[in-house]
Image (cartoon, grey):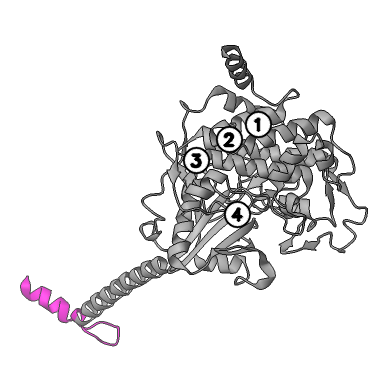
Amino acid sequence: MGSSFNFDLSKKTHIFHLKVWILVTLFLGIFIVLVLVLLWCCTARKKSKKNNLLPIIQIPNVSREIKEIKIDQNSANHDIMDFFNVQEKYGEKDSDKLLVRFKNEKEKNGDGSSESGSFNYLDKDDSAVDSGKNKGSSSPLSGLPELSHLGWGHWFTLRDLEIATNKFSKENVIGEGGYGIVYRGQLINGTIVAVKRLLNNLGQAEKEFRVEVEAIGHVRHKNLVRLLGYCIEGTHRLLVYEYVNNGNLEQWLHGAMSHHGHLTWEGRMKILLGTAKALAYLHDAIEPKVVHRDIKSSNILVDDDFNAKISDFGLAKLLGAGKSHIVTRVMGTFGYVAPEYASSGFLNEKSDVYSFGVVLLEAVTGRDPVDDSRPVHEKNLVDWLKMMVGARRSEEVVDPNLETRPSTSSLKRALLTALRCVDPNAEQRPTMSQVVRMLESEEYPVPRESRRRQKEKQDTH
């Protein structure tokens, strides 16, 4: 049998008259080569995929110190949740009631867009999705690669943001600050965003980057600008926000948006009430609480429906449970900083209350917090306002640009609320949740509990 087997292998075939064993050897060799080629192709493809997409383990962590901010159900009292759920006094379709418009507002540009200062304005259809209105609208992050989702937001590559901003072109600059430049961009899913590129002073940039992500990365409120994601690559630190395309309160009050018209009293109060609700949320409804530390009119953005959107959390501080205050380096904007914080670095949520009071006075009067062009006794807005109210001349402080003056009761409510907020004694200032109730009240703007305490003090004397 062995001899017949050998005979069969040595038998010649019709293929080039090659013997059987030679053909078998050739076929085996070709098969082995094909298997090796396929294995090499698979390995090369995997390596290419890794280089292009980066695995999840290579997505950088911002900081181990960054923790998720969760609502503390125990500390959030029922009053706070009540006023969060109160229906807005002015509907979204009543924007014209909040603004005295010029007739030629839209005729300035043939495409319906306009420009003012460093902001580019788009029609409503082009604006980013409002994070506070989830009425069936898609998320601004929908359609982006799921690999880069962070749970609360999105991790972007530098390449992603270069494409979105046309390589950070000057034409897309919409704002500049002490720590960086803000660009208008468009993501691959069509969402319009604001991209904040921190300056390459890595130490300070890293600090501000961590603070902003830590402060607002996980929180959601209709009156807070939503952080959509971030980018960490080399020394580059970038933050991606929802795009709010209707300027800021400072521009509306002091002229940069005057070609659109002047904010009515109702428009101003809606913006201030929204700001107060957002601060009450940061101070009273989440743990740890967030102290913004730089509340001013230029950091209050305005959307198309004249809702306030607090922005720029680069100076924010977190106050954990049991902490009544911290002592820190004095930062902020001159004219808005609380006196106790300016003198000693003593910081807590009452510092934000003071700053809010200054912004409220700014909205009532149309004046800057500090104006060196005015007479000495009028330079400081808070001091001048106190003098005018003390002299019973409060009717004279109203912004002359208001075509329709507020009612006496509405003006009184706003002024008394502001004066309580700017009380030099921090302990005497109201909480922001009290401020919300004061602004919404139709009565004398002092909470009942405070009036009861005042009455008890009078009875004891």
Write down the residue under mark 3.
348
* Label ID, residue 333: 4
Residue 387 seen from this side: yes
- Label 1 sits on residue: 436
The stretch drawn in magenta includes residue 345: no
Question: In this figure, which residue is indicated by the disc labeled 2?
Answer: 280
Task: Report, in whole angstroms, how far the alpha carbon at label 2 lies from the one at label 1.
Answer: 8 Å
Residue 306 visible, this orientation: no
Which numbered mark, 2 or 3, is in the foreground of this view?
3
How crowded is the residue under tag 3: few (<14 C-alpha within 10 Å), some, or many (20+)? many
* Cβ atoms under marks 2 and 1 closer than 8 Å: yes
Q: In 3D space, how far apart are the residues under numbered discs 2 and 3 (Cα atoms)? A: 13 Å
Pointer 3 and pointer 4: residues touching (CB < 8 Å)?
A: no
**What segment carries the magenta color?**
1-21
Callout 4: SS: loop
Q: Amino acid at mark 3?
A: Asn
Nearer to us in this view, 40 or 294: 294
Residue kind at label 1, given as amino acid type: Val
Q: Earlier in the sequence, mark 2 or mark 1?
A: 2
**Camera-side residue of 59 and 434:** 434
Q: Residue at x 68, y 50 (%)?
A: 297
Circle 3 SS class = loop
Distance of label 3 from label 4 (alpha carbons): 16 Å
Which residue type does callout 2 highlight?
A: Ala
